[in-house]
Amino acid sequence: MLYSPGTLLLSQGVSLCHTNLIQGTLLVTKEASPLRGNMNKYMDTLLKSSLFSSITADDVDSVLDCLGAIIKKYQKNECILMAGNTTEYIGLLLTGKAIVIQEDYWGGQSVMSAILPGHTFAESYACTPGSVLDVSVYAEAASSVLFLNVQKMLTTCPVTCGRHNQMIRNLLCDLAGKNLRLGEKSKHMSQKTTRDKLLSYLSSEMHRHGSNEFDIPFSRQQLADFLSVDRSGLSTELGRMKDEGMIDFHKSHFILKSPAQGWTDV
């Protein structure tokens, strides 16, 4: 069965992305929620986001006003942004979970990344006028997304406030971090075997979390897609690594074990 661009076969059916244009740019058809007096429940997530680093709670309302921010809500499996369109807005996930999928015309899919609360997405596309999205973003759970107009972010306000300049610095750091993670994925993909790809990915996650015990943001199928390996082969290799005492895991929770803890290299 063939799927046209912008469709995603999910566990509960095919989700189509319906879109409209706002000021010449793509946003999914949704009613925006007013921001004033509506941000308190999202404040912790917002202030922990790298994009709002060094921004205080007292400054949030004025910053969001300055950046033309809007909030939109999505149901599970609903499309947030669709490949083939353009956007002038950076998305910041406030609640829920989303996933970035690259799709070909014939329905083939590759998982690019998972989006958790506080994470941003679509920055590179929003910062490049006319750049066409070659990925789609879907809600994996009921989600709330804060959209920020990137042109307003990159054009300092008349008073050139320090908060605005801080947001620009944060955006640059965020983009640099995304480039580093893309490089990490390329490193994982360059490994020859499923085991080598798993070792590369799990080692990177350990360094990122600063601990040998951590949660990954992917299901088994999503991890297989992310590493471009067969799901059954990935599950088999994980089982072997567990039997050899290299790792332990339960669903998305992993513990990496060193040779000193008893595993043998075979």
Image: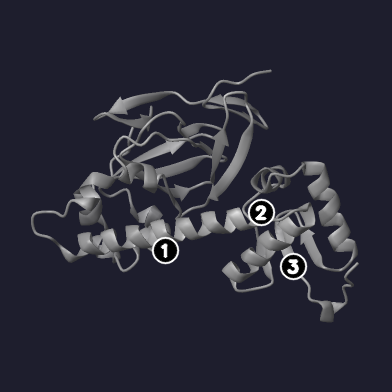
Q: Residue at x 67, y 42 (%)?
A: 225
What separation in Å lies between label 1 and label 2 (alpha carbons)? 33 Å
- The answer to which of marks 1 and 3 sits earlier in the sequence is 1
What separation in Å lies between label 1 and label 3 (alpha carbons)? 26 Å
Q: Amino acid at mark 1?
A: Lys
Name the disc covering residue 255, or none: 3
Q: Residue furthest top?
A: 1
What crowding class fits label 3: few (fewer than 14 Cα within 10 Å), some (14-19), or many (20 or more)? some
Q: Amino acid at mark 2?
A: Ser
What crowding class fits label 1: few (fewer than 14 Cα within 10 Å), some (14-19), or many (20 or more)? some
Q: Amino acid at mark 3?
A: Ile
Residue 216 occupies quadrant? bottom right
Q: Residue at x 32, y 48 (%)?
A: 38
- The answer to which of marks 2 and 3 sits earlier in the sequence is 2
Can you identify the residue that label 1 sits on?
48
Could you tell me if the residues under marks 2 and 3 are in contact, i.e. CB atoms within 8 Å? no
